[in-house]
Amino acid sequence: MTQNLEDLIEDAKRLNPIEQLVAETPGYSLKGHGRYLTTQEHDSLIIDTHNNAYFWNSKAEQGDNISWVQNRNGWDFKSAIEYMCQRAGLAAPEWGAGSPGHRLATRARQEVFEVAAGIFSAALWKNQGALNYAMSRGWTEETIHRARLGYTGDIKQFDALKEEISGAIVTNGGDPTALAGAAVLGFRGDVRRWMSDHELQPDEDWISNGRIPGLVGRDMLVYPHYFGGRCSYFSGRGVHEKSHFQLPVVLAGNRQIYCNWEWSSQAKFCVIVEGQADAVSCAQWGYPAVALCGVSMDEHVAKFLGAGMDDREVDFYLGLDSDSAGNVWNNKIAKLLGPMTRIVEWNGIAGITSFIDPITGAEKDVKDANDLLRGMTK
């Protein structure tokens, strides 16, 4: 019986540990022990053995074990999977069997997002105002690099940044006018026809405006959402105005939680917070954390984090915002995570109850993890 293609790809990923693939690549000699490894030849290359992923700071490159095989050999996704199946002693994938469209579409979206994430990251380091804003949140340069935070550019930089990302997507073998490209770049023109061509239900607001909203040019700090070394989603927060942006669902799927780089499926504890800035702040302290980002905590999300699993034992710390809304959700979420869930009260930790807002100069009460970090650095 032919194995389901989705399951075969997951088996190929699982049976090809990234540290083995790196060690077998000519010119790479592993060193170190534990979760994070590097190589003798490239100390900015970090291999995350828990997430089967890697990030290469000096090259602004990041990905999973499939990405490693693709990038080191110049192969496409299918060729990489075929090699990994052969290496693991699995049956060769039958690309014509079943419907690989969803998996390939997801991978294509991730590759477009990965290209955009690299350019957004570079844009942040080129814009002093946006970089100052990121650092005003209390984050170090290392934290900003590790989180791969980026910048969308503002309206004046829209055309140049859109052209750069479009060109990079094409160079990478993608289509900037497809769904993922439109989610990042937006689209102007015959929107009704574009939506029909992509088999989407007409959006009358987009059609009447003659444009699909994208992420580029919004003057926002960009949070790339990574799972297993792949960028699967973006969210944005205004640099000069308190505004937020979520990618259109029809183009990029539903909202996603945000896992900081310290979190992995093997983490022994996890801090649950509300926003991405809180999760990034926890990572700077060395704590694995997941931000809900408006995603409703349900049994599926709780199970993903390790709640109620026989083969995993995770200690949960629930650190939602210290306001009325956060207090209401604390009890509901704690029931899903289990009776041993601890509730974190950010205000008052280490005696810190306030911080100075760097934009307004006003003193404010600490209500979340990022407020606490800023209070520590004031």
Image (spheres, rainbow, N blue to C red):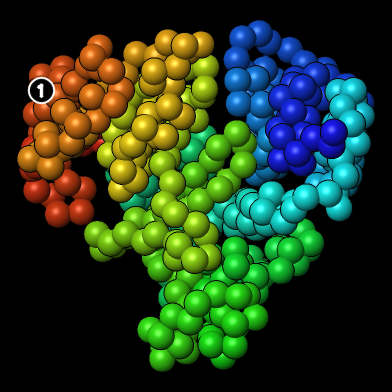
Foreground residue among 309 and 366: 309
Q: Residue at x 66, y 30 (%)?
A: 53
Image quadrant assignment for residue 60: top right
Q: Label 1 belongs to which residue?
A: 348
Location of the C terminus by quadrant is top left
Q: Is residue 120 left or right of residue 361?
A: right
In what element is the residue under mark 1?
loop
Foreground residue among 73 and 130: 73
Image quadrant assignment for residue 175: bottom right
Query: Callout 1 environment at 10 Å: few (<14), some (14 to 19), or many (20+)?
Result: few
Locate residue 210, reporting x and y percent. 47, 89
Locate residue 170, reporting x and y percent. 75, 67
Give the vertical position of 4 relative to 283 (above or below): below
Locate residue 300, reporting x and y percent. 42, 34
Foreground residue among 376 and 78: 78
Image quadrant assignment for residue 169: bottom right
Q: Is residue 52 left or right of residue 161?
A: right
Location of the N terminus by quadrant is top right
Amino acid at dot 1: Gly
Q: Is residue 94 left or right of residue 163?
A: right
